[in-house]
Amino acid sequence: MRHPTLALAAAAAALLLGAGAAQASLVLNGSFEANSAGGTVFNPGNATLNALVPNVTAFGARQGIDLQTVGSGYGLAPVDGRWKLSPASDLGGTTEAFSMTLSGPLAIGTSYDLSFYIERLISGPFDGGTVEIGLSTSSTSFGTLIDSATASASGWTQRVSSFIAPNAGSYLTVRMTTAKSSWVGLDNFVLTGGNSNNVPEPSALALVGLALAGLALSRRGARV
């Protein structure tokens, strides 16, 4: 028969492990599912996109970030939900850029984990490319570079990385590089970590305490 104290300890361990896994993303609209578009919108101006998608701010000199949904005719279906953003850039010219609002400013010097999906899109001279990710204190400036990713030959690719916050930014920013005429699909930005990372819930700590106390009493009784 399984000892009830050991079962209690196992349950406590499971709660502690699950506490980190359940941490919510700090990106408020990282999959772009919150929007008021009735369907795919190609080449909208920055003001139009900003009005359509809350907590997303387009600010690049090259305006026209596409808001695509299932069946748009370009690339694969979005990874998470029904929507994806598709920024582009011109070879040696202007680039499209946008920011995503975070739930609060990051803590300088603290480690965070970032993941998102990128896909190669092709139309005329526009073919895949590289995106740079930044952290900014302003919704309309790129800020400090923290990561980059290049679209693979085909399909969605998940990019996973970690970084130390270089500033107290409240915006995760994205811009295309101009090494080529580029066009990519982006989806499911998830940012976790910070001061709350790996902090167990009070209920889990209490359960661990009960388990340890019960285990001590059990061992004391076994020696009598």
Image: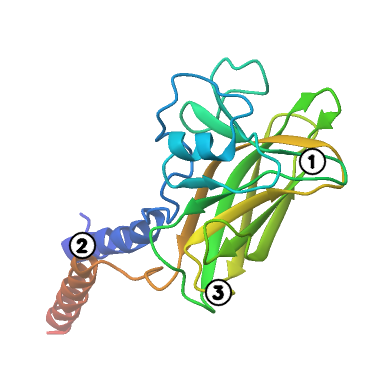
Query: Measured from the top left, where is residue 204 in percent x and y?
Result: 23, 66
Which residue is nearer to you in this view: 27 or 179? 179
Of mark 1 and mark 2, the one earlier in the sequence is 2
Q: Residue at x 41, y 32 (%)?
A: 35
Mark 2: which amino acid?
Answer: Leu
Mark 1: which amino acid?
Answer: Gly
Q: Residue at x 54, y 57 (%)?
A: 172
* Location of residue 72 by image quarter: top right
Q: Which residue is mark 3?
A: 167
Q: How many marks?
A: 3
Q: Report the quarter where the N terminus lies.
A: bottom left
**Tag 1's secondary structure?**
loop
Q: Nearer the viewer, mark 3 or mark 2?
A: 3
Answer with left or right where residue 106 lies relative to residue 6: right
Measure the C-alpha gap from mark 1 to mark 2. Answer: 52 Å
Of mark 3 and mark 2, the one earlier in the sequence is 2
Measure the C-alpha gap from mark 3 to mark 1. Answer: 27 Å
The label on residue 8 is 2
* Location of residue 198 by image quarter: bottom left
Query: Measured from the top left, where is residue 99 in percent x and y?
Result: 55, 51
The label on residue 168 is none
Q: Which residue is mark 1?
A: 129
* Location of residue 146 by image quarter: bottom right
Measure the C-alpha gap from mark 3 to mark 2. Answer: 42 Å
Answer with left or right where residue 70 lies relative to residue 218: right
Which residue is nearer to you in this view: 7 or 49? 49
Of mark 3 and mark 1, the one earlier in the sequence is 1
* Above or below 123: residue 191: below
Q: Report the quarter where the C terminus lies.
A: bottom left
